């Protein structure tokens, strides 16, 4: 079976990895360089930011992925020598308005979550500002250094002889008798038995029925250069977060901006991200911002991604619309899509992710 995967982000590469292991011949095509769009731009938190706010279909993907990311990280390091730096940093949530809902959700889903008060808050993260006297603590939440995860995946795919073609744009699908047989590209035709569209925010332009369902949502982030150990926990408040990396880099994000396909950074966002990060961790005022970047998340109307075969075009599969949860749900999303392509029993009930006619 020949599979052509359009989009070389995390989900596209994970789909390629899974299908290669099923014996498929895989070609991965990207309009730019693989692993350089939303997958690279995010923070790599292996949890939805406020998991109780999401539909059960998102939670199912997140839970499956969370259980298996440590093994993936281990395998990739063995295969490539690149450490994805998976760390169980835990997630400290300062928002308190939804504490009752959050604790109820955690109890129902067997997720470890504690309510911290008083001295327990700075004991969990000593770098916290003293104003924070209450927090929700999720000690099992991990993070991965997503650029290194992407680097390891790319190397692993090349070792498996996956064909990776970069700087090629797909201009249209080639469909005969309601079956996709290939794509037209800026470099000519490419034919395959199965076409898998995992092009993130750009997916809607190619798929009938998705043109107005996938919206690009910009997210800007910054990174402070600090000594290792300044921050040990992921801290979240009012949608903004800080993430510690092993080498002392502290990421702060992220904005949610509806600006079409505009990826330019702004001084307004830079200022806002610094203010919010230093509000949580005052010591960050002593350190400079070393990086400032933006990415475009693919948002679906409900936050539930589209995963599966197109209802009207046989052989055309999609895997997009993950919004802010592409990394945490990516491993399960790729496995579910692979299940559908090869005809295996799916890991989760597939209906919630279907493209409606």
Image (spheres, rainbow, N blue to C red):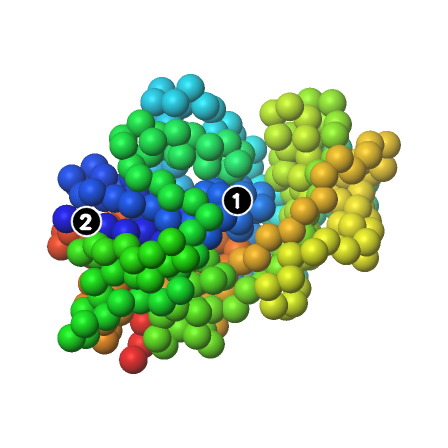
Q: Disc number at residue 300?
A: none
Residue 232 placement (x, y as % from top left): 64, 30
Question: Residue tagged by mark 1?
Answer: 36
Residue drawn at (20%, 42%), measured in percent from left and top? 25
Q: Is residue 134 left or right of residue 334?
A: right
Pointers 2 and 1 in contact (C-beta within 8 Å): no
Disc nearer the start of the sequence (2/1): 2
User: From this viewpoint, which residue is outermost toward the bottom?
Assistant: 357
Residue 21 placement (x, y as % from top left): 21, 37
Q: Residues within 10 Å of mark 1 (few under 14, many from 20)?
A: some
Work out whether residue 347 or residue 256 is closer to the camera in this orientation and state it.
256
Q: Is residue 163 visible?
A: yes
Quadrant (top left, top right, bottom left, bottom right) of the C terminus:
bottom left
Residue 187 placement (x, y as % from top left): 38, 54
In the figure, residue 157 lies in which quadrant? top left
Q: Is residue 355 left or right of residue 177?
A: right
Question: Residue tagged by mark 2?
Answer: 2
Residue drawn at (29%, 58%), measured in percent from left and top? 189
Give SS at disc 2.
strand
Residue 152 placement (x, y as % from top left): 42, 30
Q: Is residue 39 visible?
A: no
Q: Is residue 155 left or right of residue 277?
A: left
Q: CA distance from mark 2 to mark 1?
A: 25 Å
Residue drawn at (35%, 75%), measured in percent from left and top? 208
In the figure, residue 317 lies in which quadrant? bottom left
């Amino acid at each position: 079976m020949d599979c052509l995967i359009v989009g070389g982000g995390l989900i596209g590469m994970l789909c390629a990895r899974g299908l290669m292991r099923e014996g498929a011949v895989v070609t991965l095509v990207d309009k730019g360089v693989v692993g350089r769009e939303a997958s690279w731009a995010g923070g790599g938190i292996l949890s939805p930011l406020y998991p109780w706010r999401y539909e059960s279909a998102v939670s199912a993907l997140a839970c499956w992925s969370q259980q298996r990311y440590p093994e993936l990280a281990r395998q990739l390091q063995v295969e490539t020598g690149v450490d994805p730096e998976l760390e169980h940093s835990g997630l400290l949530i300062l928002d308190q308005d939804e504490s009752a809902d959050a604790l109820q959700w955690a109890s129902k889903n067997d997720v470890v979550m504690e309510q911290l008060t008083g001295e327990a808050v700075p004991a969990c993260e000593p770098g916290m500002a003293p104003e924070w006297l209450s927090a929700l603590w999720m000690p099992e939440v991990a993070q991965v250094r997503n650029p290194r995860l992407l680097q390891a995946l790319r190397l692993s795919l090349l070792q498996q002889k996956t064909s990776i073609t970069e700087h090629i744009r797909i201009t249209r699908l080639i469909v005969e008798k309601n079956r996709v047989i290939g794509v037209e590209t800026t470099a000519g035709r490419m034919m395959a038995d199965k076409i898998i569209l995992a092009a993130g925010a750009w997916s809607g332009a190619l798929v009938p029925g998705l043109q107005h369902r996938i919206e690009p949502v910009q997210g800007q982030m910054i990174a402070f250069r600090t000594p290792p150990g300044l921050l040990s926990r992921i801290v979240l408040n009012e949608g903004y977060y800080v993430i510690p990396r092993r080498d002392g880099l502290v990421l702060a994000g992220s904005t949610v901006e509806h600006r079409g396909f505009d990826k330019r950074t702004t001084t307004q966002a830079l200022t806002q991200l610094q203010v919010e990060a230093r509000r949580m961790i005052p010591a960050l005022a002593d350190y400079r911002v070393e990086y400032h970047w933006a990415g475009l998340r693919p948002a679906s109307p409900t936050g539930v991604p589209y995963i599966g075969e197109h209802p009207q075009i046989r052989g055309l599969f999609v895997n997009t619309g993950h919004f802010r949860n592409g990394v945490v749900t990516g491993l399960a999303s790729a496995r579910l899509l692979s299940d559908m392509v090869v005809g295996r029993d799916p890991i989760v009930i597939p209906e919630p992710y279907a493209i409606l006619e």
